[in-house]
Amino acid sequence: MSEQILQLTKRLLNYNHLFMKYYEEAREKGTSYDFHEVIKPFADEVKQAAQEWGALMKSWLINNPQKHLHLKQIDTTLDHIDQLSIQAFFPKTSRSRFLNANRTVEFFLGEIVKELEK
């Protein structure tokens, strides 16, 4: 199970980097994306991976309690990922709010990778 969680966590980290890339492109170049052709399929793909990760993480965390990882953080991270997957395409999204959510996701997922690779 932990190998599957590790793979999904790394996949979500990759998505988090993509969120940043799309956000920067949208802000700097004024790139606009088609909602039905680009945004929705991407957000759905991210959501499916995130939900699978969330279920596995909760199960793993209940069976393997960690000092610095908590169930509430999983829900918060899932909420952030869900928001970022859509907000990344809209340049009018608050920069500080977007960056804070992105950093929070990056940090928490990074902590999980460190824990699982011990």
Image: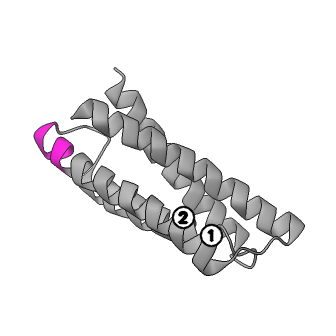
**Percent of width and height locating residue 93:** 69, 76
Q: Is residue 64 left or right of residue 97?
A: left
Residue 73 in the image: above or below residue 65:
below
* Residue at the farthest front position: 37
Q: For the residues marked 2 and 1, what is the alpha-carbon distance in whole angstroms?
A: 6 Å
Helix, strand or loop for disc 1: helix
Residue type at numbered disc 2 = Phe
63 in magenta: yes
Label 2 CA crowd tier, 10 Å (few <14, some 14–19, many 20+): some
Query: Residue flagged by tag 1: what amino acid is it?
Result: Val
In front of the other: 95 or 78: 78
**Residue name at image x 32 percent, y 40 percent:** 68
Residue 38, numbered circle: 1
Q: Are marks 2 and 1 in contact (CB under 8 Å)?
A: yes
The residue positioned 31% from the left and 39% from the top of the image is: 5
Q: Position of residue 22 (x, y in %)?
A: 71, 60
Q: Is residue 82 left or right of residue 84?
A: left
Relative to 70, is 25 on the left or the right? right
On screen, 98 above or below 93?
above
Residue displayed at 29% across by 36% down: 4
For residue 113, say whether it is visible. yes
Identify the residue under disc 2.
Answer: 42
| Element on which disc 2 rests | helix
Q: Quadrant of the N terminus?
A: top left
Q: Which residues are magenta?
A: 59-64
Is residue 112 in sight in this rendering? no
Location of residue 99 by image quarter: bottom right
Quarter that holds the C terminus: top left
